[in-house]
Amino acid sequence: MSRAAVPDSSPPAGGFAASDDGDRWVYAGELTFYNVSRVVDAARELPLPASGRVDLAALDHADSSALAALFALKRRARAEHKRLVFEHLPPGLASLATVYGVDSLLDG
């Protein structure tokens, strides 16, 4: 069996980090089924970025679970009466959103 078919026992690294001034968040690493719960839980501990900008340029690999995480963040922002904009959405994730018909939900 190939390595790709057998999930690693430890979740891939990845997570949101706030900039030093709290103006924006940056995501680095993977965002998949294997770490989405941990990532969303950790994000709850961060104040939303002051500018509402979330930079996804360093998102290495994502699956449909990443969309669920981004929607959870959008719901949180709406509940806190704040705007959240995802910048540098990886093409693969943008394509998934389009296929699922939810790409407009990721707009600011």
Image (spheres, grey):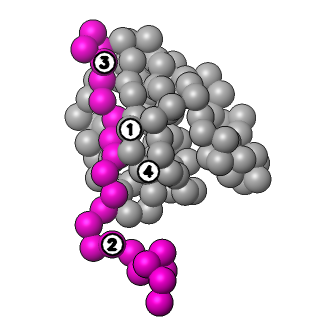
Viewer can see residue 102: no
Q: Nearer the viewer, residue 30 or 79?
A: 30
Residue 37: x and y in percent read 34, 55
User: How many numbered circles does the render carry?
Assistant: 4
Indicate the amino acid at tag 1: Ala
At horizontal 51% and vertical 31% (from top left) the residue drawn is: 57
Q: Nearer the viewer, mark 4 or mark 1?
A: 1
Answer few, some or many: residues within 10 Å of disc 4's Cα (few below 14, many 20 plus, some between 14 and 19). many
Which residue, as the protein is rendered here, is positioned at the far bottom?
1
Is residue 79 depicted above or below 34 in this figure?
A: above
Q: Earlier in the sequence, mark 4 or mark 2?
A: 2
Q: Alpha carbon of mark 3 to alpha carbon of mark 2: how far? A: 30 Å
Q: Alpha carbon of mark 4 to alpha carbon of mark 2: how far? A: 14 Å
Magenta region's main secondary structure? loop
Quarter of the figure with residue 9: bottom left
Q: Earlier in the sequence, mark 3 or mark 2?
A: 2
Indicate the amino acid at tag 2: Asp
At horizontal 33% and vertical 72% (from top left) the residue drawn is: 8
Quarter of the figure with residue 64: bottom right
Residue 55: x and y in percent read 47, 26
Residue denoted by label 3: 19
Q: Mark number for residue 28? A: 1
Residue denoted by label 4: 31
Q: Nearer the viewer, mark 3 or mark 2?
A: 2
Residue denoted by label 2: 8
Secondary structure, mark 4, is: strand
Q: Nearer the viewer, residue 82 or 107?
A: 107
Q: Which residues are magenta?
A: 1-22
